[in-house]
Amino acid sequence: MYVDTGVIIGNACKIQNGVNIYNGVTIGDRVFVGPSATFTNDLYPRAHSVDWKIVPTVVEDGASIGANATIICGIRLGANCMVAAGAVVTRDVPAHGLVMGNPGRLAGYVDVDGRKIEAPPR
């Protein structure tokens, strides 16, 4: 696991082996991050750039991120959302949203226990 400087991680999180969390990422409470998941922090990566800026990412409370998922910087993962294993998330995920695929697409909703439901809770 690699946690860069400037990363904020909330309480009661479970972060598995091989995870990469780079500067600019804020993770809320009770977040699960599966094995080998990766967060990015640069939309235009180059080995040498004089105008490089960190692009922040926010993971809200209760979110779950599956193994080998990639979270592109500049997005917000909503509270209690679930990112499927191997997904590449390129845009915001709503609270309780279930995202799958590459690029990640909204495939439904989950409850606070991660079970699929018909619509987002109110």
Image (cartoon, rainbow, N blue to C red):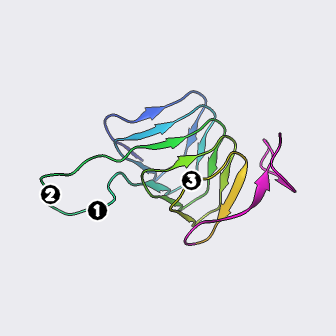
- The residue sitting at 13% across, 59% down in the picture is 48
Along the line of sight, which residue is nearer the eye, 34 or 69?
69
Magenta: main secondary structure: loop
Image position of 111 (left or right of 47)? right
Callout 2 amino acid: Ser
Image position of 111 (left or right of 60)? right
Q: Inspect the magenta stretch and tell me whether residue 115 lies in it.
A: yes
Dot label at residue 49: 2
Q: Inspect the magenta stretch and tell me whether residue 37 lies in it.
A: no
- The residue sitting at 17% across, 62% down in the picture is 47
Residue linked to disc 1: 44
**Residue 85 placed where, x, y %?**
62, 63
Helix, strand or loop for disc 2: loop
**Residue 38 placed where, x, y %?**
45, 56
Residue linked to disc 3: 92
Q: Are marks 1 and 2 in contact (CB under 8 Å)?
A: yes
Helix, strand or loop for disc 1: loop
Reply above or below: 105 against 18: below
Reply above or below: 54 against 85: above
Q: Which residues are magenta?
A: 102-122
Reply above or below: 29 against 15: above
- The residue sitting at 63% across, 44% down in the picture is 78
Q: Are marks 2 and 3 in contact (CB under 8 Å)?
A: no
Along the line of sight, which residue is nearer the eye, 6 or 79?
79
Callout 1 amino acid: Tyr
